[in-house]
Image: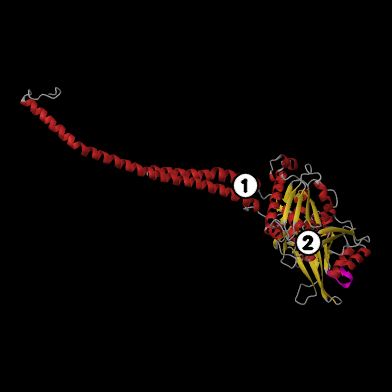
């Protein structure tokens, strides 16, 4: 017998019952155990399944979030790349002034689009002087003077825009004379003389025009402060000039003590707008260029002799072919009876000894009755800046047109180009000289400050019509650069329109100067800071942060 076998024989009945009951309970528990384990295992598997689905869902959302992040990064990089490429191909600038975005004017864009043959613009200065205003190169040329820095920046961006709008037919080359001294010799032949620092050459085939950096702006002759930007005007005129197939010559008649400031102002306006200026002394036998489109008499202070009148008459008569044009600017005080008689008798334009005095203080400039705002009527000679008070005339001599106004059958007629309001009166030159408070007289009719006479004819031998036009202006100083650069009046447009009509240069586009008071900021400098700092450094990361925060908060509750 196995000694390990429990001995139940000696057990008492009560003890046996307890053992039996315990065994039964143990058996029942043992029998119930598989069911409990099954439930627990099922519950575990269910939880594991739920966890597995949750993991899969989380992985799926994680992949989506990763893809979104990668997509945003790729799009940002692509946007930067496209922005850079477009910026290089189609450069633009931004203006933070009230006028909005900076760009070339419509007139300049038209000039750029009309370029047909390659034009090279050679700038004999380092490019960094224009592209980076903070560079040492820029500082050496501008001295940190803000208006000049703006001129440099505007010029640089205007060149890029011209290249873009001309489909790269206008190309630009910056030449540092210190680094490339031998390259200069290659351009000397174009200029016809030594090339100097700050020269700007416009080259089209064999034609070449040269300007200086200081031609790109005008300044006050008293304060020497830069007042206007001539960048667009100069670029357009030089590009038009070098691609033109014909010379546009304006001849200034001298030899009679002409006012030097008037001559300079004429040159400033017309030379920079595509005309070639020549001077001929009528007291001598110098030839007058046969390509002269218009002759100009700029405020002579001594009278024309009989010989000078003869030369003037012969030139206008043109061997019977007529067809020539003359612009006369009357000196405010000079007495020139021979010249004025010629103009009155042969072309019906009388230069009087009266000066205009304005009595309406709303039409007076700087409280001076002889500085007055005049009207520009719409005529065949005027098209830009037409309207009341659009011209500022100074010390104006009254002009009286004696020819009738134009009709359908007119062979000769006169046209008023600048007139004054009914409030304008007249003061005689003698009274103005002798008295500090001269008497102003009423005038029965329209007071005229500038007028044109037109004479139609017919050349039998050539079987062609002829057209001779003479314009007389009573205010020689109305083309002073202090007035032509004013943005509130249209003096410059007036003179450009008049010359366009006289010269027949219809393909020339008039572009006026731009006041430096307009706060123009180039994209290459300040706007880069705005776009780079605000858009890419602050705004875009902030948007991504907000998107990430939104996704995080949504995922927390999934």
Q: How would you classify the magenta stretch by its main secondary structure?
A: helix
Q: Is residue 38 left or right of residue 163?
A: left
Identify the residue at image location x=70%, y=40%.
135
The disc at residue 244 is 2
For label 1, the SS is: helix
How would you rate the neighbour count of disc 1 (Cα within 10 Å): few for under 14, some for 14-19, many for 20 or more? some
Give whichever of 452, 106 is nearer the camera. 106
The segment highlighted magenta reads 316-323
State the residue position of label 1: 527
Residue 365 visible to the viewer: no
The residue positioned farthest toward the left in the image shown: 13
Query: Residue 237, relative to residue 343: is it above or below?
Result: above
Residue 300: percent from left, percent from top: 87, 58
Identify the residue at image location x=59%, y=44%.
532
Here the colouring is secondary structure
Q: Earlier in the sequence, mark 2 or mark 1?
A: 2
Q: Quadrant of residue 103?
A: bottom right
Q: Nearer the viewer, mark 2 or mark 1?
A: 2
Viewport quadrant of the N terminus: top left
Residue 412: percent from left, percent from top: 80, 73
Q: Is residue 33 left or right of residue 473?
A: left
């Amino acid at each position: 017998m196995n000694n390990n076998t429990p001995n139940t024989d000696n057990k008492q009945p009560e003890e046996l019952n307890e053992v039996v009951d315990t065994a039964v309970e143990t058996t029942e528990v043992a029998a119930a155990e598989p069911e409990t384990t099954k439930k627990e295992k099922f519950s575990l598997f269910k939880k594991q399944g739920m966890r597995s689905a949750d993991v899969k869902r989380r992985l799926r959302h994680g992949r989506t979030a990763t893809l979104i992040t990668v997509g945003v990064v790729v799009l940002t990089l692509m946007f930067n790349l496209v922005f850079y490429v477009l910026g290089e191909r189609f450069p633009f600038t931004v203006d933070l002034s009230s006028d909005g975005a900076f760009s070339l004017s419509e007139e300049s864009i038209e000039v750029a689009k009309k370029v047909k043959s390659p034009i090279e613009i050679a700038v004999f200065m380092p490019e960094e002087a224009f592209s980076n205003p903070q560079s040492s190169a820029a500082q050496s040329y501008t001295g940190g003077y803000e208006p000049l820095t703006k001129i440099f920046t505007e010029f640089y961006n205007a060149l890029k825009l011209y290249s873009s709008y001309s489909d790269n037919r206008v190309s630009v080359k910056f030449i540092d004379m210190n680094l490339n001294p031998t390259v200069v010799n290659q351009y000397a032949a174009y200029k016809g003389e030594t090339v100097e620092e700050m020269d700007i050459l416009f080259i089209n085939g064999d034609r070449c025009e040269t300007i200086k950096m200081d031609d790109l702006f005008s300044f006050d002759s008293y304060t020497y402060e830069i007042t206007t930007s001539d960048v667009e005007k100069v670029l357009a005129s030089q590009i038009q000039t070098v691609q033109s197939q014909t010379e546009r010559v304006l001849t200034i008649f001298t030899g009679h003590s002409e006012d030097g400031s008037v001559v300079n102002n004429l040159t400033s306006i017309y030379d920079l707008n595509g005309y070639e200026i020549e001077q001929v002394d009528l007291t001598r036998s110098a030839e007058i260029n046969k390509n002269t489109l218009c002759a100009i008499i700029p405020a002579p202070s001594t009278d024309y002799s009989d010989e000078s009148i003869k030369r003037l008459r012969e030139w206008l008569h043109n061997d019977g072919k007529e067809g020539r044009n003359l612009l006369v600017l009357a000196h405010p005080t000079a007495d020139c009876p021979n010249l004025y008689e010629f103009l009155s008798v042969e072309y019906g334009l009388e230069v009087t000894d009266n000066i205009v005095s304005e009595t309406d203080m709303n039409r007076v400039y700087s409280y001076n009755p002889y500085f007055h705002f005049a009207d520009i009527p719409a005529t065949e000679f005027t098209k830009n800046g037409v309207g009341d008070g659009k011209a500022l005339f100074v010390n104006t001599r009254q002009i009286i047109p004696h020819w009738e106004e134009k009709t359908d059958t007119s062979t000769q007629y006169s046209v008023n180009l600048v007139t004054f309001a009914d409030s304008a009166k007249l003061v005689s030159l003698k009274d103005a000289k002798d008295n500090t408070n001269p008497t102003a007289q009423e005038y029965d009719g329209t007071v005229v400050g500038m007028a044109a006479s037109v004479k139609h004819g017919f050349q039998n031998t050539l079987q062609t019509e002829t057209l001779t036009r003479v314009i007389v202006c009573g205010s020689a100083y109305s083309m002073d650069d202090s007035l032509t650069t004013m943005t509130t009046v249209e003096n410059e447009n007036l003179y450009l329109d008049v010359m366009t009509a006289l010269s027949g240069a219809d393909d020339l586009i008039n572009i006026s100067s731009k006041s430096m008071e307009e706060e123009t900021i180039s994209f290459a400098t300040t706007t880069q800071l705005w776009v780079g700092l605000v858009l890419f450094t602050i705004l875009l990361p902030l948007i991504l942060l907000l998107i990430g925060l939104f996704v995080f908060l949504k995922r927390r509750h999934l």
